[in-house]
Amino acid sequence: MPRSLLNGAYYVVLDEVYRDTTRPIKKNDFKRILRFGGTTRKRIEPLLNKCVTDIAGVFVEKKVLSGTVELEPTKMPSHNAEETALLGMDDIELRNIQLQFPSARRFSGESACVEVRVRTDRGDILVAIQGDRNKPAIITYHDLGLNYVCFQPFFNYVDMRALLENFCVYHVNAPGQEEGAPSLPEDYMYPTMDELANQLNYVMGHFGLKSFIGFGVGAGANILARFALVHPRKVDVLALINCTSGQAGWIEWAYQKMNTRSLRSRGMTQGVLDYLMWHHFGRFPEERNHDLTQMYRTYFTRNVNPTNLSLFIEAYVRRSDLGITRDADTIKVPVLNITGAMSPHVDDTVTFNGRLNPNNSTWMKISDCGMVMEEQPGKVSEAFRLFLQGEGFVAPLSPTKIVAFRRLSDAERRRPCRHSSVIRITENPISEAVVC
């Protein structure tokens, strides 16, 4: 048996191809191959080109589609045992494949919130506290179909975790909207939007707060805006996402009436589910992030009390106009007005911006998203941080501290954080706004 091999390659002699024999290439064999005449064409073929082997001839374990493939060695059929022993290779037979699908995405449970019941004039409401109570307060208010869990992914974002060392967050839930809430009594009169805003006074009195920073989304943004109009000294600044300042139109009123009837009679139907998805994400959300939309569809179906949600929707659709104008009565506190380019509430935010004081308000539209906190948390967190810094609430975070938090997050989650430093802010688009 010759010992000299050329890169472990073998060639088959054409005249002996039907004899199924192979032999290693010698140093002078290339000259013989080049001397073959006619249409005869020679090729160099690797031995065992259809076998999956390990160099040591032992058991092999590979990953296929996140599943474990069990491979067992079997003897390779060969007419020359010395060649097989020389290469030290065994044929591998595939016996079993077990696929392991990744776990479904769900809301993060890393917030470590403490839930407290606060008594108000219209019943008890649930407030989830995140952070040190001795620090300045941030009060959040959620949108339709959600509760404080919708803020968990955003406030657990790496850049927000670095910012929240200086604050304590109080997540306020509308009556009956928390997870596992029992159905409200049939004779229960659900609070109006103004009464929901007035309940914040009970929250402030319960925790001894003198003022707070408001952070609201959708219906929650409307509630915080109403509170700031009546109690401007109790609100420092407002960060509002998809805020509406006017009454519900006829189309919205008709859709919401159909939704409330379906929720009360048949529960969470497909029509109501589609409307909620459109309300939060805009059109065609599955084309942007299928995993995210599937998580919210599952949450709306399993974790929302349909009866209580119908009451909240009915209170929102019956909302009154804020009654503010740019030249007269308007919100006196600084306002950061945010929306997504694909959100169905862009026009509402433009109208709301046209009724605010341009000296202390900023309108911001984030591209390529509908639900900005979920789809673009990096841009929203940076805009919120710069907004607070501009109002003198926090000192600028050093780049070293931000990098340290990102490295800590990478070590915990074992994945790189997605952060974009590009923010496009358009201030006060008067030409696009509808001034009432």
Image: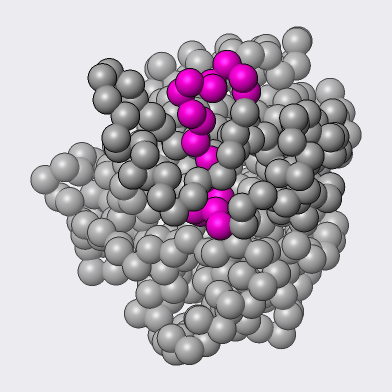
Quick check: 133 above or below 176? below
Quarter that holds the C terminus: top left
Judging from the image, the colouring scheme is one colour
Q: Quadrant of residue 117?
A: bottom right
**What is the residue that sits farthest to the left in this orientation?**
431
Q: Position of residue 318 (x, y in %)?
A: 53, 29
| Residue 135 placement (x, y as % from top left) | 66, 83
Q: Is residue 127 visible?
A: yes
Q: Residue at x 27, y 18 (%)?
A: 39
**Image check: 171 left or right of 419?**
right
Foreground of the two, 245 or 141: 141
Regarding residue 181, the answer to whether it shows in the image is no
Residue drawn where x is 30% and y is 55% of the image = 364
**How many numbered marks appear?**
0
Closer-to-camera residue (343/88):
88
Q: Specify start and end residues of the magenta stretch as a single range.
A: 4-20
Check residue 243 for magenta coloring.
Answer: no
Please say if 255 is above or below 94: above
| Residue 12 on the magenta span | yes
| Residue 186, quarter of picture | top right
> Residue 207 location in percent, x, y?
76, 73
Q: Is residue 199 above or below residue 360?
A: above
Q: Position of residue 381 (x, y in %)?
A: 47, 65
Left/right placement of residue 351 relative to residue 222 reads: left
Q: Nearer the viewer, residue 31 or 319?
A: 31
Q: Residue at x 21, y 57 (%)?
A: 426
Toward which corner of the image does residue 357 lie, by quadrant?
Answer: bottom left
Residue at 56%, 57% (x, y): give it. Answer: 4
Q: Nearer the viewer, residue 349 or 108?
A: 108
